Image (cartoon, rainbow, N blue to C red):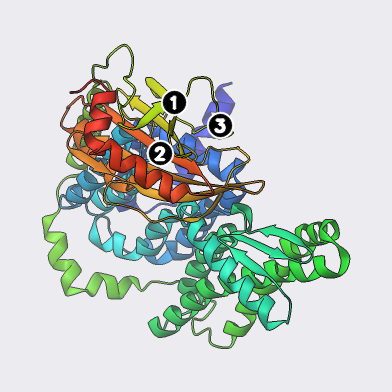
Amino acid sequence: MQRDALLDRFAVSGLAERIAPEWRAPLLNLAIVWAVLFALTVRDWVAMAHQWWDISTYNHILFVPPIIVWVVWQRWEELAKIAPQAWWPGLVALFGALALWMLGTVAGMNIASQLGAVGALVASAIVVLGPKVFAGLIFPLAYMVFLVPIGDELVPVLQMITAKLVIGLIHLSGMEAHIEGVFIDTPAGLFEVAEACSGVMFLAAMVALATLVANVCFVSWKRRAVFLCAAILLPIVANGVRAWGTIVIAQWQGIEFAAGFDHIFYGWIFFAIVVAALLGCAWRWFDRSPDDPGIDADAIKASPLLGKLERFSFRQSFASLSVVALALMFGGWAFAADHVEADLPPTLAAPHVPGWHIVAGEVPNWTPLATGADRKLRLHYHDGNGYAVDVSIAVYAGQGPDRDAAAAGQGALPMGSDWRWLEPGVSGNSWSADWLYNHGIRRLAQTSYRIGEVTTGSASRFKLAAMRDRVLMRGRPAIAMILSSEEPGADAALSRFRAAMGDPALAMDRAAGLR
């Protein structure tokens, strides 16, 4: 036992000796503050890891941590020549990152909280290591943004772009087809540019890869910009070609054969060819030597600007204490804000709409989702002219990660249902509109959110209002109201219903017992 302990001590000592003396204390401090920040934001890291592993769109992120380690290792020989200096202005960046994390946490905005969690690690590195080391590590630290799963927000836009590309290619190839939103009707059958066909997975992976290649293989900023633009446009166009090719094959061999061919060939081989083609075409313009470490330590140390910035240094012990203090402050604030709740009535009141009556017992084939809502109300209205409108109201005592009224998969398009998003509808001042489709049925859904004095159809504006309330410790209910009707006559039915209902803010407040 004593022999093993002695060997371990010598091993650790040998490792420490390979690290320059001026780096030992800063690296230890960085490890400590990163451990504290990781403990504070562990829920976000667990959520991100789940997405990396279980969601195919983000599987490529599993390669990002080893890539970051590799890039730092490539620069280490030059970095070792720079002496770290704790830098107190970096606390401003850390304050901003932790504020973003707290705002995202209390409002249930995962992107904000996860960006804040990653940003806190980056900012703390600036605090502990100083501006000169940060200049040497700027790319690997900036590359950490790819740890955050971002991309699902682009799916509807990419679906529409892909559908437009496909219908254009179909017409160019002399085939007959009709497009309605993301659905393309051809003689071979009806095709949907579904979420999985949007190309977001390939686009997200390509942007991460292209950013790495642009830094590692290019020196010229002009060449980097051209390469990145090509890397963004190419997967979008290639995905349109893939979808068009699937439809063409379906014309010849049938839908089942085309679907299998799409998953095997287009799912793997086609996009591998696209990546290889991009890198192959760019190869001749690579202007960075393979032996180039990526940074010049002498130039960094001689920089007048970095020299002036380094004057604002302070002791390493103060750096770690300051980081821990900020982490505790924002952690306590987030905990307190997360427990602010609004008082709600025992039940919700059905909106009174002149000229319309509630039909009891009639359940449409559409069920909106309101996970975590404290009060729910679903009603089916008829008027005397054959029009019908479905009303769904959900009231929340507070917003958070598990009860977010405007989260993806919540509301009019329930996650996992047979309904599909078709195309955007005509939105109003206080509602957003979406056309949905399910086995030949078209449905128009108009969604409004209300919190405090804010009534909007924008999920982002609603989330910002909810965030403001939580930060200011104001317990006010959040309300989501969806008005929906099926074709034919969906637009007319909803217009007549809104005219009779009046101010949607008043209707929502009355339903929630606020007036």
Q: Is residue 230 visible?
A: yes
Give the x, y percent position of residue 230.
52, 78
Residue density around tag 3, few if under 14, some if 14–19, many if 20 or more, within 10 Å:
few
Residue 251 on image: x %, y %: 82, 69
Q: Quadrant of residue 246?
A: bottom right
Q: Is residue 115 visible?
A: no
Q: Secondary structure at mark 1?
A: strand
Query: Which quadrant holds the N terminus?
Result: top right
Question: Who's the residue at 34% across and 22% down the image?
Answer: 350
On screen, 84 above or below 468? Answer: below
Q: Along the horizontal axis of the image, is 474 left or right of 356?
A: left
Q: Secondary structure at mark 3?
A: loop
Furthest residue toward top: 346
| Viewer-closest of 48 and 295 | 48
Q: Residue at x 12, y 56 (%)?
A: 312
Per the rendering, the mark at residue 378 is: 1
- What residue is at 77 percent from the left and 71 percent from the top? 248
- Which quadrant, please, contains the C terminus? top left
Callout 2 amino acid: Leu
Marks 2 and 1 in Cβ contact (< 8 Å): no
First reached walking from the N terminus: tag 3 or tag 1: 3
In this rendering, position of residue 308 left or right of residue 45: left
Labelled disc at residue 483: 2
- Of callouts 2 and 3, the N-terminal one: 3
Query: Is the residue 87 above or below the residue 376 in the image?
Result: below
Q: Which residue is mark 3?
A: 364
Label 2 element class: strand
- Classify 10 Å Cα crowding around label 1: few (below 14), some (14-19), many (20 and above): some
Distance from the alpha carbon under mark 2 to that under mark 1: 10 Å
Give residue 33's position: percent from left, percent from top.
Answer: 31, 38
Furthest toward the bottom, the residue is: 284
